[in-house]
Amino acid sequence: MESGLFTAHNVWMMICTALVFFMHLGFSFLEIGLTRQKNTINILFKNVFIICTGLILYYIGGFNLMYPGEFNGYLGFAGFGIEPPANGMTASYASSGGYTYWTDFLFQGMFAATAATIVSGAVAERIKIGAFMIFTVIYVGLIYPIVGSWQWGGGFLSTLGNEVNVAGELIKEAGFYDFAGSTLVHSVGGWAALIAVILLGPRIGKFDEDGESLAIPGHNIPIAAAGVLILWLGWFGFNGGSVLSADPEGTSLVLVTTSLAAATGGIAAFVFSFILFKNLDLTMFLNGILGGLVGITAGADLMSPNESIVIGALAGILVVSAVTIIDKIKLDDPVGAIAVHLICGIWGTLSVGFFGAKAGLDQTLYQLAGIGIIGIFCSLTAFIIIFTLKKTVGIRVSKDEENEGLDLHEHGMDAYPDFRMNQH
C-alpha cells in the first residue's frame, strides 16, 4: 500500500477516535439533562472518571486481554502494558492496512469506557460514588475485554458455524456477527445496567404507595437534546471507524445507514408515543434517535438504506414500549439506558439475521447464541460485582443524601451556585 493511502486511512481512524471520545460529552449532557440539578456534579464526575480510568485500564491490560493473539478462544492475555510489534507502524499491521498499532489501541480504548457510561445513566441519583468507581474498574478492566475477545479478538463467537471446504481445507465459517457493538458494547453495558437497577431499587418518590410511576422531570432538557445530537455525531466515528479504514464505499454506506436509522428511530418513537399518550414527548424522540443508532450498529455495513430505515423505525417503537414496560415493573432508569442500549442492542444484533447480506435462519441462530451467551455472562458477573459491593461497602446513599442531592454530600460542590444564590 502506498504511503499516502496508508496515511489517509490512519488519519480517518484518528478522526473517528476523536469522534468516539466526543461521545462521552454527549453521554454526560444527556444524563445531567434528564436528571435533577442537585446531582449534576456527581454525574459529571462519574463520566470523567470513566473515560480516564477506562483508558488507563485498557493500557494496563484490557487491550491485551481483548486482543491476545493466538488463544483458546475463551480467555487469553498477551501481557501487561502495550508495545507495538515490529510492523506496528506500517500498513502490514492491520488486515485492512488502514491504521497503526497506536491508533488501533486508542480507537479500541474509546469503546471500552462506553459500557460503564451506559450503567452510569441507569443508576443516576442514588448510587454511592465509591461503589460505582469500584464497579467501573472491574467491569471495564476485565468483563468488557473478555467479552470483546470472544468476537473481535478472534474467539469462539467469531468462529461459530459449520465447517466448510475452502480450497481443500476444512475451516469454520464465521457465525455471530456484530459490526460495531450492538451487543459487544451496548448490551454489555445494558445487562449490567439492568442488574444494577434491580439491586439498587428506585429513587425516592419514583413510585407512589399504589406502585404508580411518577414523573421526576430532568432539570435541563435543552442540554439533553444537545447530548443526543453530539452522540449522533460521535456515532459517525463509532460506526464509521469500525470499517477500520477510510474505504470510500464502506465508510459512505455505514454513515448513510447510521443516519437513516437514527432519523427513523426518532420519528417512529415520537409518533408511537403520541399514539399511546397523546403528547409530543421530546425525551421519547431523543431516546428513539439513540435506539435507532444502537439498533443499526451491529449491521451498519451489511444493510441497504431501506433496511436501515426499517431497523431504525422498529428500534424507535421498541424504545417507547420498553420504557413503558420498565416503569410498569417498577424499575427506575432515569435516562432510559436499559431500553436504548439493552433492548435495542438485542434488536440490532438480531436484525443481522433478518436483513442485509447475512440474513438467514442460520445467521439468526448464531445471533441468538451470541446474545444469550453474552447476556448470561454479563448478568452473572455484574450481579457478583454489585451484590458483593452491596453487602460490603454498600451501593446506595442514605435517604438524607438522596433528598438533599449527591453534589452536596459526595462532592461538596454545586453545579449552579449563582443560580441558587439568585433563588434566595
Image (cartoon, rainbow, N blue to C red):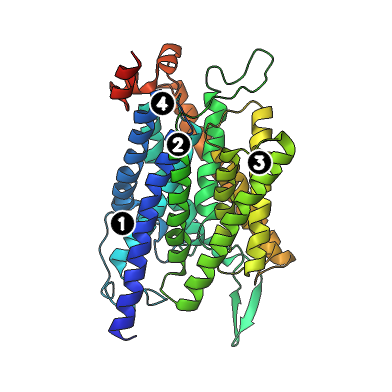
Residue beneath the point at 46% across and 29% down:
219
Query: Which label's residue is closer to the chain start, 1 or 3?
Result: 1
- Whichever of callouts 2 and 3 sits on the residue coming sooner in the sequence is 2
| Residue 141 visible to the viewer | no
Mark 4 vs mark 1: which is more N-terminal? 4
Q: Which type of secondary structure does the marked residue at label 3 adopt? A: helix
Establish if 18 lies above or below 90. above
Judging by the rendered image, the residue that carries numbered circle 4 is: 37
Badge number at residue 31: 2
Along the viewing direction, whichever of 117 and 420 lies nearer the viewer: 420
The residue indicated by pointer 3 is 320
Residue at horizontal 64 percent and vertical 33 percent from the top: 326
Q: Is residue 354 left or right of residue 80?
A: right
Provide residue 66's location: percent of width, then percent of height: 41, 57
Q: Nearer the viewer, mark 2 or mark 4?
A: 4
* Secondary structure under the numbered disc 2 in the rendered image: helix
Give the mark, 2 or 4, whose residue is nearer the N terminus.
2
Q: Amino acid at mark 4?
A: Gln
Task: Determine which residue is flagged by label 1.
Answer: 79
Q: CA distance from mark 1 to mark 2?
A: 36 Å
Which three-letter amino acid code belongs to the residue tagged 3?
Val
